[in-house]
Image (tube, grey):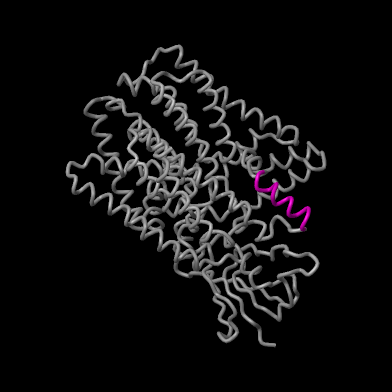
Amino acid sequence: MKKNIPIIFLLIVISIIRFVAFTGKGAYAFPDEERYTQTTMALKSLSQGNLRGFCTHISSTNGRPGDSTLKIIPMAFQYMLYKYKGIDPTNPESLLIPVIFNIIICSALLFVFYRLTLVLFNNNEGIALVAALIYGLLVNSNIYIRHIFPYDGALLCFFCVLYYGLNKVRSYGSGLQARDAFIMGLLAGLGFTLYPGYYFFVVLIFSVLFFDISAIHFDKRIFTLFSKSKYTRCAIFIGGFTSIIAFYELVSRLGGVSYVFTSAKVALLINQGSYEEGFSFLPKYLLQVEGATGAIILIFSLIYLAIILKEIISSKRLLIDGNYWKMLFVLISIGFIIHATATFLHKMVFYGRLLHMYFPFMIWATLSVIIIMKSEKWRRIAYAGVLASSAVCFLLFLSDYSSVAYPRDVLYQFGIDTHDPSTIRINETKEWANYDSPPPIDNKSRKPYGVNNHMMLVNFCFFYPLSDRNDFRPVNPAPAGLVFSGQHFQTFPAYSFEGFSIKERIHAKERRYKVSIYQRVQ
């Protein structure tokens, strides 16, 4: 327990920062977050004894039934607020509940990441704590907390699988049992149903089983090709994984759809972005979003990849010195190459959320390079440099992120009812979808909404696409009438990597669209 005290303290500090900095705005800003409404309807159907309706809504999330099931936890609290206080689940104040749930999930993810680092780096608590600190301060580790997305929940499941398997081998010094393989299969299946975009994690975990991690770690062998126990474990893992898939297929069939067929169709929709960015997307994200920390992680990861490739070429072996961390790095690198190649072939594109699964491995690679530095002086400088960079970049991120404006939340903050006929909307580009005012906190008084007094709303919309740079119609009302102006969230660098092409990101950066409210002169 004592060795967990530093990470627990770190988790408490980071969780407090996240609660203060990230709660209160941002939820329901993206169209994808509206899938959460299906959880509301599922819980409502269940309370009415309508099993078919429950199954229908759980399955109506574009291949993410596990996420809608998990989200029943925060929705149960919101549903009670709705039932006894009349507060709609999509009200910004009610949405604090799923955001707090996100913070809990992210804290659990950071803890598992810390424990997994201990397993991979021979119980070195210093290395594990440094890794957790860097990971917890990344923009990519924090940008999704405000939103109702499944990414961190899915990553938590997959990291739990890795930790469970690798820790079992390290602790007991024997091969995984059938029960262990089945549990790993169940957790991997749950992670996949939470978010199928991290599909390669299933391949990675299966490969870990296939390469027989116990033999790798203790006997320093690559793997035993003909091993009945190994193939049995792999088969049982597949059985555990497919049992989760089969369960949700049954649930979806009861609801009148097919989970498997829906998931297959969703795979064809990963096309909102740029096919021009396969191998370049990750470096661009690291440099433009993560800043100096991203540059350090990128350079050190490439150095570590070069070291591994040299070792493989020189020894003609996949694994060196029985180190299965190196195997994981090789496998995840292959996963990135596959996705980047698929982008080049116009099969799918990259999003920032799809990079989410690669960052932990890049942090481990960065620390691996520092560890093998011969000079203790340079090791200390490297550790200090990456930690200082992480802290500074995170503070800069917090400063910039605090000024980001989300149209839906601004409407609620200023009590503007978009259904009021005196309200005028103007958007500075032709492609958009307008936001409506969130439901009031009090249905009787309609608080916080009142008389709008002839407001003009500029860019209270979701921009998509932004590819035509000439399609910009600036609005310049009298400055004296300005009530509010803030940076539209889609122009924030991390958000612009969520579906925008290269041209669209440039357009968003150049125009820096503002969310503005003007008082009209009568």
- Residue located at (46% from left, 53% from top): 14
- Residue located at (62% from left, 30% from top): 245
463 or 332: nearer the viewer: 332
On whether residue 80 falls in the magenta region, the answer is yes
412 left or right, relative to 233: right
465 or 388: nearer the viewer: 388
Q: Position of residue 505 (x, y in %)?
A: 46, 60
Q: Position of residue 383 (x, y in %)?
A: 28, 49
Q: Is residue 135 above or below residue 211?
A: below
- Residue located at (36% from left, 60% from top): 392
Q: Quadrant of the C terminus?
A: bottom right
Which quadrant of the structure image shows residue 370?
top left
Q: Quadrant of the N terminus?
A: top left
On whether residue 156 falls in the magenta region, the answer is no
Magenta stretch?
73-85
Q: Is residue 242 above or below residue 346?
A: above
- Residue located at (53% from left, 71% from top): 486
Which quadrant of the structure image shows residue 399?
bottom left
Q: Position of residue 260 (x, y in %)?
A: 63, 33
**Chief secondary structure of the magenta span?**
helix
Q: Position of residue 482 (x, y in %)?
A: 58, 81
Mark count: 0
